Amino acid sequence: MRISRRHRSLGFGLGFVLGLLLAGPTALGEPAATPAGWSDQLALLARTLVSDSDDPGADAERLAWLMSPDLTVRQMGSSGNESVARLRQLTVGLMPIATRAYTWPATSIATDLAQDLGKCDSLPQAIRGQFCPRDDAQARRFNHVASQWMANVLQPQPGQLVGVIVLWEPLPPITTTLLLGTTPEPKQPLFVMVKAIAAEDGTFRITHLVYGDVRQALS
C-alpha cells in the first residue's frame, strides 16, 4: 500500500542551504574512477526502493541481497538507526529523477544533479531553479558545498564507493486537483545518500543509507 508523503519547500537555493550545514572547507583530493557495475547497482537500488510491484517478496529479497549485514539506515538530522522497511514506506511509488554513483572523492555532485533535475519535466521550475547554478563560479561553489555535504553525511574515506539517489513524487493531474478542490502542498525532492563496499563476487554491498529532504538535513 502506498503511503502519502508531504515534503514542504524551504524556499532556499541548494548552495545556500547546503552551505548552512557545514563550517569550514574539506580537502577532497582528486576524483577516482568509478568501478564498472556500481552505477548499475545503484540504479537497481533506486528502482527497488520505489517499486510498487505485485510481488513485494521479490523486492524484499532484492533489497536484502543489495545490503551489507552491517547496514546503517538513518534519517538526516537524526542519529537513530532505522530499517530499510521504514525507508521503503517513504519511497514506494516515487519516481527516481537522478541516480549518480561515485568513488570518493566526488567533485561534481551538484552539477551532475542539476543536469538530471533540469531534464525532469514533472519537477516544478521553482524547485529546478534551486539546484541549477547560474554561472561557472556558482557551479564550482555548489559542487564544493555538495561534496562537503556528502562528506558530513557519509564520512567516506578516499576510494570508497558512494552515491546519491533523488526521488520525486509528481503532482496529481490538474483535473484531480480541480475535482477535489485542494491545492497540493509544496514539496522537496527526497535524497538518499549511499555508501557501499565491494563484495568478493565483484558486486557491491550497501553499508549506509541516509535519507531526507533539505528541511530534514537542517534539523
Image (cartoon, rainbow, N blue to C red):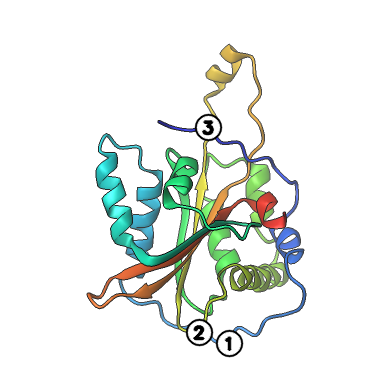
Judging from the image, what secondary structure is the residue with disc 3 in?
loop
Q: Position of residue 89 (x, y in %)?
A: 46, 41
Q: Nearer the viewer, mark 3 or mark 1?
A: 3
Kindly identify the amino acid type of the residue bearing the numbered disc 2. Pro
**Residue at 24% across / 46% down in the picture?**
58
Are discs 2 and 1 less than 8 Å apart at CB?
Answer: yes
Marks 2 and 3, the one that precedes in the sequence: 3
Which residue is labeled 2 in the image?
158
Q: In the figure, is residue 1 to the left or right of 4?
A: left
Kindly identify the amino acid type of the residue bearing the numbered disc 1. Gly
- Disc sitting over residue 4 in the figure: 3
* The N terminus lies in quadrant: top left
Are discs 3 and 1 less than 8 Å apart at CB?
Answer: no
Q: In the figure, is residue 156 to the left or right of 124?
A: left
* The C terminus lies in quadrant: bottom right
Cα distance, mark 3 to mark 1? 41 Å
Mark 3 neighbour density, 10 Å: few (under 14) some (14–19) many (20 or more): few
Q: Which quadrant would residue 88 be assigned to in this image?
A: top left
Which residue is labeled 1 in the image?
29
Q: Position of residue 35 (x, y in %)?
A: 35, 77
Q: Position of residue 154 (x, y in %)?
A: 55, 70
**Residue at 40% across / 48% down in the picture?**
49
